[in-house]
Image: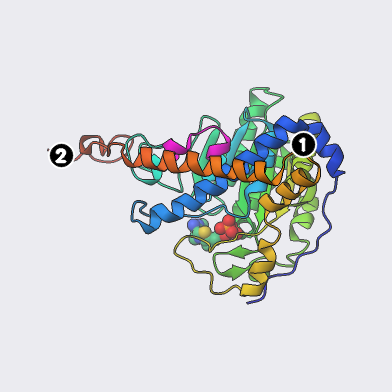
Amino acid sequence: MTEPHLSHVFFQGNPDAIASALGTENLLEMFRQMNLIRQFELRTEIGYQQGKIGGFLHLYIGQEAIQTAAVKAIGLENWWSTTYRCHALALLLGETPHSLFAELYGRSTGNAGGRGGSMHLYSRRMLGGFAIVGGGIPVATGAALSCKYLEKKNEISICFFGDGAVGQGVFHESLNIASLWSLPCLYVVENNKWSMGTPLCRTMTNHDLFLEDAAKTYDMRYLRLDGMDILQCYAGFKEAYRHIINEQRPMLIECHTDRFRGHSISDPALYRMKEELKACMERDPLLIMKAYLVSHNILSEEQCSAVEKSCREEIVAAASAADADPWPDIRELEEGVYGPTLEIS
Ligand SMILES: Cc1ncc(C[n+]2csc(CCOP(=O)(O)OP(=O)(O)O)c2C)c(N)n1
């Protein structure tokens, strides 16, 4: 099937001005974070093939620039939520690779005590990992309402979801109420053009302009970002944060991106043309950032490779440590679960 076409009129800042506002330390941190996420995801594929991970596994490979830029631009001390493709956000919000691997491996030391697995990661400021498509949108809207109600004027709620969620009533109801009540909520559509094996043109009417029109309908500002370019994403999220805080209004961002793997690990993505996927992968966000850093003498090729190597080593060590962790105790099976108590001996 051919890739759905989308226009490429993006919000555009001057890359050198964006990089200089960020400063070398932040640029290096973001490059490392993207590499850490990539290595984490690559390692989970191995863990799955080894039978160490049960249940679903959805990878963020190809989309790393978006959440890395958003967390850097907006800051941890806000309310964050995302979909089942949630490993990256948990890492960015400070969860350790060890606790996330332990969760994926079902160990008691895991991020959710080994009970949630890949789709249900949390953090102090991360409301989920939502497995229900669109499930995070009203929750994030509620978090924005709490910011307003408690008069936390520097806090906002940020909600990531896929293009497959925007045909749902909950998307429209949430944007409508957020606009009516002037809630500080940032809705971020990570438009990777596919909902499982269904292309965008079969899920979204007038898909090129649908989200821009939705923002107009709900009277909120809209930005379209190149989700493969971390500098442009950073500038877009910074602008969104400024707007939401200053105006106390919700906002909608659409990031055009690509997932380089199937929908989940069990999807070989045979519905995509090899040549088109290859063309997408030429715009790998890690390669785009690396090219910028090298061409501006911020890092050499060798230093970039050293970052990748050190991230790989950190991830391999975390995965091995998690693999040696204890399983949850059977006597705790019912903790945190609603329902009648079972007798377990
Ligand atoms: C309400 C609901 N309907 C259907 C599903 C099954 N489902 C899981 S992921 C998915 C596709 C979602 O695609 P998209 O929102 O574009 O996000 P992406 O996976 O591309 O990041 C579907 C239909 C679900 N989890 N929840």
- Magenta part mainly helix, strand or loop? helix
Left or right: residue 282 versus residue 266 is: right
Disc 1 designates what residue? Answer: 238
Q: Which residue is depicted at the point 28% across and 41% down?
A: 339
Q: Residue furthest top?
A: 151
* Dot 2 and dot 1 residues touching (CB under 8 Å): no
Q: Residues within 10 Å of mark 1 (few under 14, many from 20)?
A: some
Amino acid type, label 2: Ile
* The one of 111 and 326 positioned closer to us in this rendering: 326
Quarter of the image with the N terminus in it: bottom right
Left or right: residue 272 versus residue 106 is: right
Residue 84, visible in the rendered structure: no
Q: Residue furthest bottom?
A: 1
Numbered circle sitting on residue 344? 2
Q: Which residues are magenta?
A: 90-100
Amino acid type, label 1: Lys
Ligand 1: give its quadrant: bottom right
